Amino acid sequence: MTIKRWSRDFGILTIGLIVGCQSSLISREGIDFEPADPPAWLENLPDPIVHDEERLLAGNTTPYSVLGETYTVLSDATGYVSEGYASWYGTKFHGRPTANGERYDMYALTAAHRRLPIPSYVRVTNLDNGRSTIVRINDRGPFHEDRVIDLSYAAAVKLNFEKVGTARVRVEVIQAPPQTRSNPATLPIVTRYFVQTRTLNDLDAADAVTKVFGRISDAIPSVVRIADESTYRVRAGPLVSRTQAERLLALAVMHDLPGPEVIEE
């Protein structure tokens, strides 16, 4: 693994309600890490689909204070545009809760922002190379004065600045299109994806693998006994897309799980 030279001033946020209904956000500093070689599929990771989502209290407490500064979450982000420096955060925070309670996935296209409502969708453009991607805001930060957004590792790879740590960017809020009602008769057949290990001879080993899956993903792990044999496989899922399955596969390989592969049903 390659050690990055910058440290995130405000990693994954821990939010606690204190007297007066104010929000206390705790900063975590340290050196972050990146995989030696980004998974090849990250370059072609599709942008998230922009859609209306309910704004919950989690992550949207306003005003809130961090490191002596007070911030106000925007009530309406329509037309929001800003420019400045973006940073990114990766393996050190992977799997930890974000400001709205979701689990941070370094291989998903997400980001942290100080003032945009959670969730929001923004287009981020690297002003040095013209690359752009859409990310979903689900966290708070960064709290360096010269940074306007903190991106996931996947977003940094798509914008091609994961090696240098920061980049000049433009951030533009994207509004969800009007919702349309689908005709059930025209809905496509849904393929389910799982990440499954090779055959294991020990139930205790299978249980241990299940616990690892539980730490690295929200996908539900289960132990499958092979018929007429005292052997087992562990599978996690279902996942709704091949991309999600490949993200989990990359994590399974990173955590040395035995012979993981993606299967479809």
Image (cartoon, grey):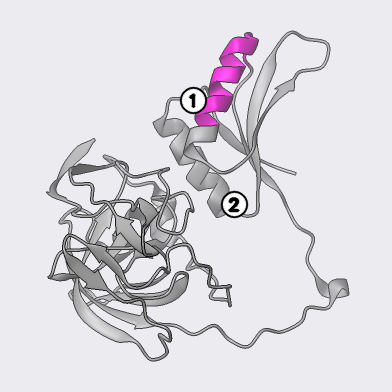
Please state which amino acid type lies under the numbered disc 1. Answer: Leu
Q: Count every numbered label the image shows and give the total.
A: 2
Q: What x and y, as percent, mark residue 138?
A: 43, 63
Q: What x and y, as percent, mark residue 10?
A: 23, 54
Please state which amino acid type lies under the numbered disc 2. Answer: Arg
173 or 24: nearer the eye? 24
Q: What residue is shown with label 1?
A: 257
The answer to which image quadrant residue 194 occupies is top right
Q: Mark 2 and mark 1: span between their CA atoms?
A: 19 Å
Sequence order check, earlier mark of 2 and 1: 2
The region drawn magenta spans: 200-213
Q: What x and y, as percent, mark residue 114?
A: 29, 70
Which residue corresponds to the image point at 18% horizontal and 54% vertical from the top-left?
A: 9
Q: What x and y, as percent, mark residue 2?
A: 19, 39
> Label 1: few (<14), some or many (≥20) within 10 Å?
some
| Up-down relation of residue 121 to residue 91 (above or below) | below
Q: In what quadrant of the picture does the N terminus appear? A: top left
Magenta highlight on residue 120: no
Q: Which mark is residue 230?
A: none
Which residue corresponds to the image point at 58% horizontal and 73% vertical from the top-left?
A: 54
* Callout 1 secondary element: loop
Which residue corresponds to the image point at 49% horizontal and 85% vertical from the top-left?
A: 175
Circles 2 and 1 in contact, beta carbons < 8 Å: no
Q: Nearer the viewer, mark 2 or mark 1?
A: 1
What's the magenta bit mostly, secondary-structure-wise? helix
| Up-down relation of residue 224 to residue 17 (above or below) | above
Q: Which mark is residue 242?
A: 2
* Callout 2 secondary element: helix
The answer to whether 118 appears left or right of 210 in the picture is: left
Which residue corresponds to the image point at 13% horizontal and 69% vertical from the top-left?
A: 145
